[in-house]
Image (cartoon, rainbow, N blue to C red):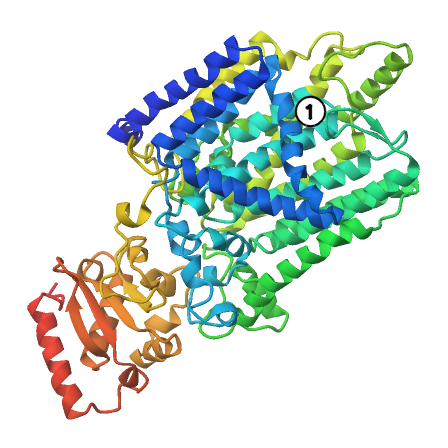
Amino acid sequence: MRELIGILTREENVRMQYEILVMLLVFSVPALRLKDRKKLAAVWSASAAVFCYLHRILLPVLLSGLYVYCIAGVICVLLDADIRAFVRPGKALLKRLRPYAGRQRLPYTVVMVVILMIQLCRINIAVDYDSLRYGLRSDVLLTGGHGLRGFFENTGLVNLVYTYPKGFEVLTRPLYFGHTWGYVLCVNIWILLLILLLGGAIARELTGSADAEVLAASGLSLVPGITNMAVTAKSDLITLLCQLAFLYCTVCYVNLSPPLCRDAQGGAACLSEGSAEEERRRLTGCGLAALVLSYAFKPTALVFSSLIGVAALVCILLYGKKRNIHLGIGARGLRVLLPAVLFAGIMTARTWIISGMPFTSVFSGLFQRLGMSLNYPFRIQAVNSMEPRTLTQSIRFVLTRLGGLLLCPVGEDMLHVQMAWGGLVFTLMLVTVCAGIRRAPGYMKELNRLREVGLAQHYVLPEGRDGRFSVEGLKLITSAAAVTGIMSLLSVGLLYQLDGNYYMLLYALAVILGSTVLYTCAAYETSPLGKNLPVIFSARSNRAVILLAAVMIWFTACSGWAGPVGFTPVDPVNRGYYNHEAEYGITDPLHWDKHTRVIAFAEEPDCYLLKGRVESWVDIDGSGGNVYLTDTKLNIFKEYCTFAKTDYIYADLRFLHDPEDPRRQRADTLFVYMLEDGDFESVVLAENSSSKIFAKIDKERMAEPWEVPLSEEKLERTAEQCAWYESIGGYDTQ
């Protein structure tokens, strides 16, 4: 509790909480006062622009949005083989946003807008360790200065994170310009918006209701485990987007049934059998393209994307057998599927060529059993390093972890869950699904029957009840959620360190299913024919949602991968972006080329703020690295430095002389060994520092074993360097 109070009372967080209240007022008051949708949209856009400008993110968010739109436009052009299709994403976005301007849905929309604004207003200063480690240095790390050839080269970066599929980094590569990372970071803001809308779209396909659509989207926005990933430069969100796009296409596919009517875009439309078959083929191609693309962004897609793919395939085959429908891909589907396969294939080929395996991380052990082996200098990683337990201990351990995941993420193994927690919305939706999923299909069938009776008698359906309930779609999403949940449950018991972002797909599916079940039950209770609006949009339920939203908005703002950092300091006189090079203190100490190869025996992530291709001690010695290179003979580490063509060792005495960390003491020992072995051409202190050292490697000597005697010249140089190192307190006397 004392720690929590300390976080909340920090000056920057106090200011942030006051500004969030201002945001709520700025976006809520116009929603209550203005009835014209266009005027409301203009006021909200202007207000958002002001907040973005003050927090120095306006230019990056606009340019990154334009870039994301161009990618979407190119996909549409490929799909239709028509350049005029480039404008389709804009029209589709405007159409998809219309339900969110409904009078009774505006409180839910305000919640979504405020969540997006919170992430935007802090994105400049919420740069996390992983983003600095590999997400925001892609312009340096991807090619090693050797262009396309370097993209497929093993450049000696030991840690397996550098071998992960780099699809997101490749897509954002054109945005590395200027003095800011904002252009790259803001891509995930737009992807988050697409995820919210796509989650809502799936709920609408399941219920035919705009009310359920808005409920699902707003529920997703209140899951910190999803929204907090928007302030990183990691590939989690784009992977989730691909997975949801696949599920959306499969639900649309099963909804194309007699009388072949769909309500995907807000109005029912009946298709002929020929048109329906063509639409099915297009959906098959688009769905498969989205699923295949997910493999290009994150290694865990190998498990989760494959599982939901198999679950969807089984459901579609069962559905098709009943309706005499056969899977097929038309020309339109192939036009997007083939580029997706090519892109994912290139990303996978890179991993395979560099590492020796198509996917790394915890999967390296699996591929080893299939006869593959990791290339030098990588090492097989175990799934976990926990001690064996009895059955009773294992059950107690899993239940304790589940309690943390669902209700209160505290404890050392929950630190990464706190950064991306599912939150109360996930827990409530999970309970809703478990309580109502068995009754929901029956309710849907009865509601569809009542709807058909009402239409036959020319009844007018109220707003939000304009489409059919999809029993087949509900079964498909339930199957996908079930297999995802089973795998997530296994990981809870197997993994040593849990990360909240491991469960993003489960979070999303639980919210979508929960919203669907909640809406279905509410609609059934107000039958026949929905003469009253569902109780989920009543005044009482709105008050409950406001209270829940307040709690989760607060938790979202006070959590994240970079911790609670407040908002980017307001600067009224700015150029619309945040100068990360100046503000973060990115340095070029010795006028290095950006591809200068550096191994840093220093703190993370500070060492990544040096220009150059910096690899930290933890990269090599820690999780995902290869402790064999550091724990054995000096010659082993010298061999690695030669293989990696290392130019400099950057060492911080405060890091090396940490008496409580034996791994840092090993780094200190290695550095002294290299110093006394004559492996450095020069050793100098950083400017205005008494502890930070830059040691330029003598590559000729580094390539020789330590047993090879030094020349007289190098002996003299080494003696001078050792004397200098001792004079600055380099030899640890403790």
Image side of residue 391 versus residue 584, left or right:
right
| Residue 489 shows in this picture | no
Q: Quick check: 170 above or below 11?
A: below
Which residue does the image show at 71% across and 52% down from the upper left?
A: 336
Q: Inspect the image, locate mark 1, and give the three-letter code of the amino acid beneath it.
A: Val
Is 120 in front, or is 81? 81
Residue 146: image location, x then y, percent: 45, 71
State the residue in front, 94 or 512: 94
- The crowding category of the residue bearing disc 1, from other C-alpha atoms within 10 Å (few below 14, some 14 to 19, many at least 20), is many
- Quarter that holds the N terminus: top left
* Residue 429 placement, left or right of 16: right
Q: In this view, does 360 lie to the left or right of 524?
A: left
Residue 344 vs residue 644: left or right?
right
Which of the 4 image quarters holds residue 72? top right
Q: Position of residue 304 (x, y in %)?
A: 63, 49
9 or 58: nearer the viewer: 58
Q: In this view, does 101 lie above or below 250?
A: above
Image quarter where the C terminus lies is bottom left
Total residue callouts = 1
Can you give x and y, in whole percent of width and height, for residue 438 in the image?
Answer: 74, 27
| Residue 548 visible to an observer of this rendering | yes
User: Residue 577 appears at what percent x and percent y?
Assistant: 36, 40
Give the residue displayed 37% in from the left and 32% down from the top: 53
Residue marked by disc 1: 517
Q: Secondary structure beneath disc 1?
A: helix
The image quadrant that residue 368 belongs to is bottom right
Q: Which residue is drawn at 52% across and 26% down?
A: 112
Residue most extreme to the left: 727
Q: Looking at the rendering, which quadrant does residue 532 occupy?
A: top right
